Amino acid sequence: MTFSYFFYKTVGAFLTPPGIFVTVALFGALFFCPKSKKKGFPSFSFAFFFALFLYALSIPLTARFLLLPLEEPYPLEIDGREGKAPVVLVLAGGIWSSDGSGTEFAMSPETLQRFVAGASAARKIGASLLYSGGYPEKAAEGRIEEMVRRTAERIGFSGELLVEGRSRTTWENFLFSSEIIRERGFDEVILVTSGFHLRRSMNSASRFLWSVPVRPLSSGRLEGDGPFIATDLLPSPSGLRNTSLALRELAGIFAYNLFGSLKDR
């Protein structure tokens, strides 16, 4: 990496969001806070540490540090089936109202990635495919099934497809899909979701699918295990997004464990 390239990337990173907010906070700390000897230092300290906090949240290095422990333990490929009646369970990661009225829906890119990975795994091992995920409006449940079956047709999946369109959270994914799994007598579950989402999902699976073997399958990772590069220290929208996802997952894991422990008492 040449100096001119790194300089160009640095200037761009600190003059566009989210880096511009770090720049503004530092500028304010240096030129506006220390006007009063008595009140300036606390103000300067707050502005400086706020800028430092924003910077840490926005760099890819922080995202990698938080995401790798969440994503690395889980495989990207499935070897084969272990049960006689396996099912691939795909957890939705977002559904959009494609027409703005709540009558037509489309999978978010994240959900589509999970669905394609799940369909591929189901086709490979000869399993049924169960999609789990709904929309905030209960009236949309039928539309969700239409969307899922339309998407399956587009990607060429012709196996058995089941749709659970009521759930709106990870907890509800397992609450409702576990009913279908028990009713249909599936004896193995291949759980498909994004790599960063698998730890929380496996925690939930252990509570609702304790009588059925569950194997995790990652639909993709946000962070790889490649070498460190200098631009990992520059603020970026993707760095902030990935850090936010990781922090949300860690908070969710804590909340699910706390909620589960309280229910077990």
Image (cartoon, rainbow, N blue to C red):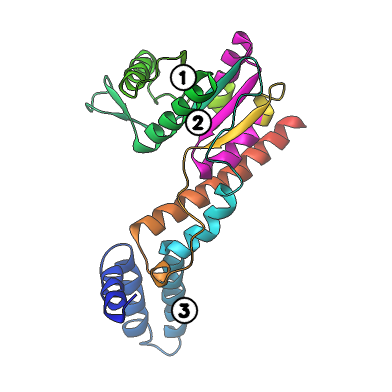
Q: Where's residue 59, x and y in %? A: 42, 64
Q: Which residue is mark 3?
A: 45
Identify which residue is drawn at 24% across, 24% down.
101
Question: Which residues are the magenta region?
Answer: 177-205
Kind of residue at badge 1: Arg
Q: CA distance from mark 1 to mark 2?
A: 10 Å
Q: Which residue is mark 2?
A: 169
Kind of residue at badge 3: Ser
Q: Where's residue 98, x and y in %? A: 25, 28
* Residue furthest left as drawn: 99
Task: Say if the magenta span includes residue 186.
Answer: yes
Identify which residue is drawn at 56% across, 33% down.
78
Checking the image for residue 51, the label placed there is: none
Q: In the image shown, does 65 or 165 lie closer to the viewer?
A: 65
Q: Which residue is mark 1?
A: 166
Residue 185 found in image quarter: top right
Q: CA distance from mark 3 to mark 2?
A: 40 Å
Kind of residue at badge 2: Thr
Secondary structure under badge 1? loop
Q: In the rendered image, which quarter contains the N terminus?
A: bottom left
Q: Nearer the viewer, mark 3 or mark 1?
A: 1
What is the crowding at mark 3: few (fewer than 14 residues within 10 Å), some, or many (at least 20)?
some
